[in-house]
Amino acid sequence: MSTPEPRPSPGLLDLFERRGLNAALGWAFVGILLVSAGVAVGGGRPLWAGFTLALAALAVAPAVARRRVDAMVPWEVLALASVPALGRLLVVGRTVGGVTLTGRITTYVAVAAAALIIAVELDVFTPVRMTHSFAVLFVVVATVATAGVWAEARWLSDTLLGTSVLLDGRDEHVIETALMWDFVAATVAGVVAGVVFEYYFRRFADATPRYPTDAGGED
């Protein structure tokens, strides 16, 4: 009589299920980002396409570095990063109370999401450990810094490629005022993202069983 093979313990089985589900959802949201980037290219928005591709690259960086498809940040981070991309697809041109939904709102949710991905990856996949207050400050500063890079990218695009993303014919002081409000919006988005990072991803969400935590890529 053959001896039945030992079954994985419930804890180990649960670990594999959680890690696999997190990876599957994470890669699904990466797919959404890639589709959104393709649509942006087709719609003549190369800068937004480039930014969306940068988000996707940040998302897959741990999997590429560790050569493991299950080395993904918690899927909730990528879901948040996908919201602006979906917004550009589904509500393009619509306004609420005179505010264009595909303007500052979606842009700086995306900027904050990029900073959030960086913070979570540092916390999850590196030895870096931040205090509670510094974690929030880091996300805020990273968000504002990303907003600065985004502003420079728009200016360079208009200057070198002849687009009209930032330099669209408005007076110089109007453009400068709009940029300052952009940085204000980025700061607010960064504060919200920092609070989400600290009080959800670091304190509430049990993310540890979702990814391989060793540096060598073996469990």
Image (tube, rainbow, N blue to C red):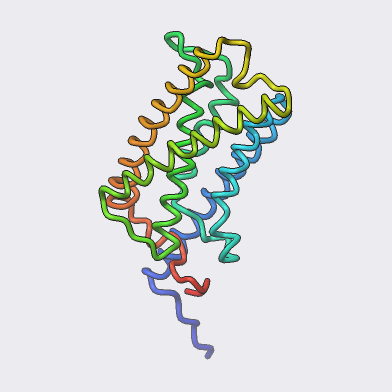
Which residue is painted at 47% across and 74% down in the image? 219
Q: Is residue 121 above or below residue 51?
A: below
Q: Quadrant of residue 156?
A: top right
* Residue 128 showing in the rendered view: yes
Which residue is painted at 45% across and 12% down in the image? 96
Q: Is residue 212 above or below residue 164?
A: below
Nearest the eye: 156 or 217: 156
- The image position of residue 95, as x and y in percent, is 49, 12
Which residue is painted at 33% across and 36% down in the image? 191
Nearest the eye: 20 or 91: 91
Direction from residue 153 to residue 207 in the image, left or right: left
* Residue 76 showing in the rendered view: no
Residue found at the far bottom of this picture: 1
- The image position of residue 37, as x and y in percent, is 65, 35
Q: Is residue 49 above or below residue 134?
A: above
Nearest the eye: 23 or 92: 92
